[in-house]
Amino acid sequence: MKTKSPATILKPPSQPAPAGPVKFGPITFVPGRKGGRYPYCHSLVVEQGQVAWVVDPAADKDYFAELARTRRVTGVFLSHFHEDHQKYNHFFPEACFYGPLLEAEAFTSMAAIFRLMGITDPQFRDYWRDTLLKDFHFRPPARFAPYLPGQLFQLGEVILEILPAPGHTPGHSCFHFPRQQLLFLADVDLTPFGPWYGDAASDLEAFAATLNDLQPFKARTYVTAHEQGIFSEEEFQAGLAYFRQVIVRRDEQILAALTAPQSLAQLVERRLIYGKVKEPRFVYDHIEGQMLSKHLERLLRQALISRTPAGFRRRS
Ligand SMILES: [Zn+2]
């Protein structure tokens, strides 16, 4: 049996992110440094007079230092627990931090972060603890409140609605601003890399279901946390289609590699997901292994591969 490649590989929308802040009424899109690439992300600021809220504060140190100096930031909304969405939390010590209930512990405890990510190796834990403290200023917020799917928050004329979008992480959520017809997609980021599900707690099937759930969602503006950042409806639809296709393509690449049996470690070496070696190597080994595992589990369930003593093998 030969696996067919999709006839055409769709191109993702890939305009560069705006160079400066973009206003949508009382909501400001703040572009992340490095084009919104890790360790930064695009952020949103909601303003009502002297009071402000921030969504995923990891865009730009100078912007947030100025915001903290000139506004009273009372709320910080976090789409999920990842460090590249919380880099500048520490500018807002007075704010209440809101994060998904399903990941609540990971906003206050390193042990919970390790558990969700699936980091068991003591040296990896030490490295990650140092990274979170040094590069991301990790510290448990003085005030944290978990949010739930469908919950509504209001600041002046702005309503923020919690829209669960699991897969990337268990509690990963989008934020809908119905009055401005703006949907913040967070790490359903529609980047050329494709969907990321590299934690132990990430879920490929849930991510695929989230793509389906988001498809009929109507908004005027779609905002992601990385790279292009601002999408029209047409680009949003193209981005979702591309993400679906990347998942299929990864399945196909893995199947093609399994004509001879391969262990997970051997597959990790081939960098089928990332396409290249990135540093630090043990971190990317971990992520590559996690993402491959989700595909392998799915291909096993679909009876397209089997597990043999020599490794995973494609069924003929
Ligand atoms: Zn993330």
Image (cartoon, rainbow, N blue to C red):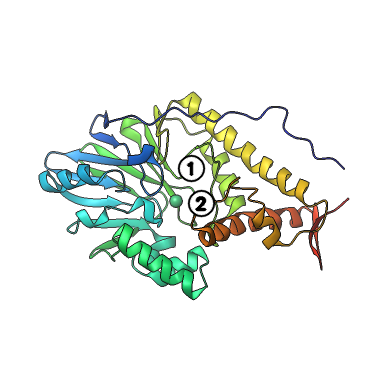
Q: Which element type, helix, strand or loop, lies under badge 2?
A: loop
Residue beneath the point at 88% across and 50% down: 316
Give the x, y percent position of residue 63.
21, 42
Q: Distance between the residues labelled 1 and 2?
A: 8 Å
Whether residue 211 sits left or right of residue 304 in the image: it is left
Which quarter shows the N terminus? top right
Up/down of 21 relative to 154, above or below = above
Residue type (three-letter) at the residue carrying disc 1: Val
- Ligand 1 closer than 8 Å to label 2 CB: yes
Residue hosting label 2: 168
Give the x, y percent position of residue 93.
19, 59
Up/down of 294 relative to 274, above or below = below
Q: How many numbered markers are drawn?
A: 2
Closer-to-camera residue (15/111): 15
Residue beneath the point at 70% across and 46% down: 251
Q: Of the residues under marks 1 and 2, which one precedes in the sequence?
A: 2
Up/down of 163 relative to 113, above or below = above
Residue hosting label 1: 188
Q: In the image, which disc is placed on residue 309? A: none
Closer-to-camera residue (263/315): 263
Residue type (three-letter) at the residue carrying disc 2: His
Q: Which element type, helix, strand or loop, lies under badge 1?
A: loop
Give the x, y percent position of residue 305.
80, 55
Q: Seen from this angle, which residue lies furthest bottom?
A: 122
Residue beneath the point at 42% across and 37% down: 227
Up/down of 308 relative to 301, above or below = below
Whether residue 36 sits left or right of residue 261 in the image: it is left
Residue beneath the point at 41% across and 29% down: 16
Would you say the residues marked 1 and 2 are in contact, meaning their CB atoms lie under 8 Å apart?
Answer: yes
